[in-house]
Every structure is written in C-alpha cells, then in structure tokens.
Image (spheres, rainbow, N blue to C red):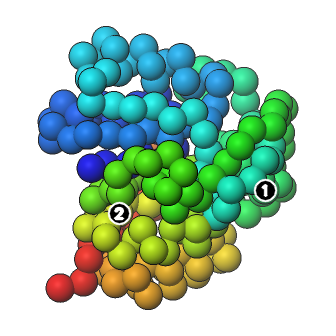
C-alpha cells in the first residue's frame, strides 16, 4: 500500500503502480494538477491501481484555503492552511480556494482507506504538519520519502523529531539536480526506514 502525498501529475504514483504493482492512494488538491494526474493514470493503464483523492492532508480535519503560487498545469509550491511556502517564508500567492483538508488518521478512519506501508510526501513546506497529524499511522509504515528544506528550521527539526520518535532512521538524502540553487539548495528527498 503506497500513499503519494502531493502527487502532482502522478510520477511516483504511476511508477509504484507499474513497477512495484502497488495499490496507490494519490493525494493531490490542485485543480490544475488533477486533470493531468487522472489523464496520466489512464494513459499508463493504472486506473485500477491508483485512487485519486482530491484533498490536501494536514494535521486535522478542517476547512481552509489552498494558496497557490501558480495557475499552471503541473505547478507546485502551494500551501494548505498556512501562509508560508517550502522555505518557511511568506507565500507569494496568485490564486486560492477553500476546501476540506484532513489528517492521515482522518483519511483512514473517515474515508476507510487502508493504512500505507510506504509514503512519498512532497507538499512544499507543510510536511511537518502532516507528519504531526499522522503519528499513529507512522507506527505501521515501513519506509517514507519526505522532501525537507533544511534551511526551514521548524520543518526540519519537527519532521526529524517525529520520524525518530516513531522509530525511523535516516537512510539517505538526495538533493535535486534540477532545483539546487537559491531557496532549494538545502532541500532534500530524505528516505527514512524503520529502525531494526
């Protein structure tokens, strides 16, 4: 069971479904990305394996705004329920709308979806907030890939503390070869695995 939190257009979701034969739950709230995500799952013949949830995750069930820095299809750098972005600084929003957000625990209990074995989380700044709302769920997760900006101290420290407390150790971290300058230069995909 694989949860793709911040699925965007479905790169990780499709890979997990096609290459690992996983059942995938793809969380993507952006109306601009949902069409591409749905289209990509269909064109890659994984519609039976990928369930799209057009909702953001957070630390609790709430109605809040998704603030976006772009109205482009396939865009990123949005934030749900917070006014900061991937670097902890004020988001330069160009578009917003209200929707319901939920925690990982709400997703399981209210939507009756299975708990994940594996998680990929890339939501551009609120990773630590989502982790906070999923502590009970994390106890059953085998591995998690989470994007962390180490210059955003609150995100970095809180994410690390939660993951270590829930029994994970950092196995690997890798920066992007594409976005590795400016506010992204200390942003890494961190892979955390269950401690032996």
Q: Residue at x 50, y 80 (%)?
A: 162
Q: Which residue is mark 2?
A: 144
Horizontal and vertical percent position of residue 14: 30, 31
**Residue at the image position 49 percent from the left and 74 percent from the top:** 135
Element class at badge 2: strand
Q: Residues within 10 Å of mark 1 (few under 14, many from 20)?
A: some
Q: Is residue 27 left or right of residue 151?
A: left
Q: Is residue 185 left or right of residue 49?
A: right
> Toward which corner of the image does residue 152 lie, by quadrant?
bottom right
Q: Quadrant of residue 115?
A: bottom left
- Residue 145 vs 74, above or below: the answer is below
Q: Is residue 140 left or right of residue 91?
A: left
- From this view, report whether residue 176 is shown above or below residue 193: above
Q: Where's residue 119, x and y in %?
A: 36, 56
Viewer-nearest residue: 61 or 120: 61
Give the position of the C terminus as an image quadrant. Answer: bottom left
Q: Determine the residue positioned at 36% across, 76% down.
A: 139
Q: Nearer the viewer, residue 110 or 132?
A: 110
Name the residue carrying label 1: 82
Instruction: Answer left or right for 103 relative to 63.
Output: left
Residue 143, by quadrant, is bottom left
Residue 144 in view, yes or no: yes
């Amino acid at each position: 069971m694989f949860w793709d939190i911040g699925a965007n257009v479905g790169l990780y979701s499709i890979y997990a479904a096609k290459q690992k034969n996983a059942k995938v739950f793809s969380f993507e709230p952006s109306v601009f990305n949902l069409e591409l995500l749905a289209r990509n799952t269909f064109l890659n013949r994984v519609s039976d394996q990928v369930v799209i949830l057009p909702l953001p995750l957070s630390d609790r069930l709430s109605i809040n705004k998704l603030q976006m820095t772009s109205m482009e299809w396939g865009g990123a750098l949005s934030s749900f329920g917070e006014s900061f972005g991937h670097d902890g600084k004020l988001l330069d929003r160009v578009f917003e709308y209200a929707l319901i957000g939920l925690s990982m625990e709400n997703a399981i209990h209210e939507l009756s979806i299975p708990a994940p074995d594996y998680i990929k989380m890339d939501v551009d700044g609120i990773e630590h907030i989502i982790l906070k709302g999923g502590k009970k769920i994390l106890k059953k997760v085998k591995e998690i890939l989470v994007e962390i900006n180490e210059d955003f101290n609150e995100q970095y420290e809180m994410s690390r503390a939660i993951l270590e407390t829930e029994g994970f150790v950092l196995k690997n971290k890798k920066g992007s070869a594409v976005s590795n300058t400016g506010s992204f230069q200390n942003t890494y995909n961190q892979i955390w695995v269950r401690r032996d």
